[in-house]
Image (tube, grey):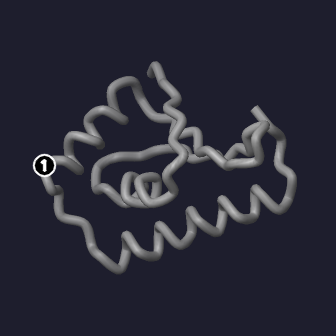
Amino acid sequence: MKTEIHVQEKPELVGILRKLPSFHFTITPQKMPDGRVSFNLEAETGEYRRALQALADNTPIGSRDVLESIRLIRTLMFTTKSAGAPTR
């Protein structure tokens, strides 16, 4: 199984992608040299593109699930920022 990594800086999008049904991403926060936090989304080749298409096609997702996921990703972002996690 071949994987690819996409870097995303928007916690809201990462939170939504995390909750799309039938998609699985390994999400790793990373502090960038300028102090901002980005997220590495690792998945099988083509999975990121298919997930974005599913989002564009308005795939149903539970609103509470999405809000909780965004909150979790934002918490990860602030924890990474305050902890001085390794920079890329």
Q: Residue furthest right?
A: 84
Q: Residue furthest bottom?
A: 64
Label 1 environment density (alpha carbons within 10 Å; few <14, some 14–19, many ≥20): few
Q: Which residue is at 71% across, 64% downward?
A: 78
Residue 31 image position (x, y, % from top left)? 74, 45
- Picture layout, residue 12 above or below residue 56: below
Secondary structure of the residue carrying tag 1 is: loop
Q: Which residue is at 41% across, 75% downward?
A: 67
Left or right for 37, reference 47: right
- Picture layout, residue 2 above or below residue 84: above
Residue 46 image position (x, y, % from top left)? 33, 26
Left or right for 32, reference 60: right
Q: Which residue is at 46% across, 53% downward?
A: 14
Q: Residue furthest left?
A: 57
Q: Residue furthest front?
A: 34
Choose between 51 and 2: the one closer to the eye: 51
Determine which residue is flagged by label 1: 57
Residue 77 image position (x, y, % from top left)? 66, 59
Q: How many marks?
A: 1
Mark 1 residue type:
Asp
Q: Which residue is at 29% across, 42% downward?
A: 51
- Picture layout, residue 24 above or below residue 3: below
Residue 60 image position (x, y, % from top left)? 18, 64
Left or right for 36, reference 10: right
Image quarter of the N terminus: top left
Image quarter of the C terminus: top right
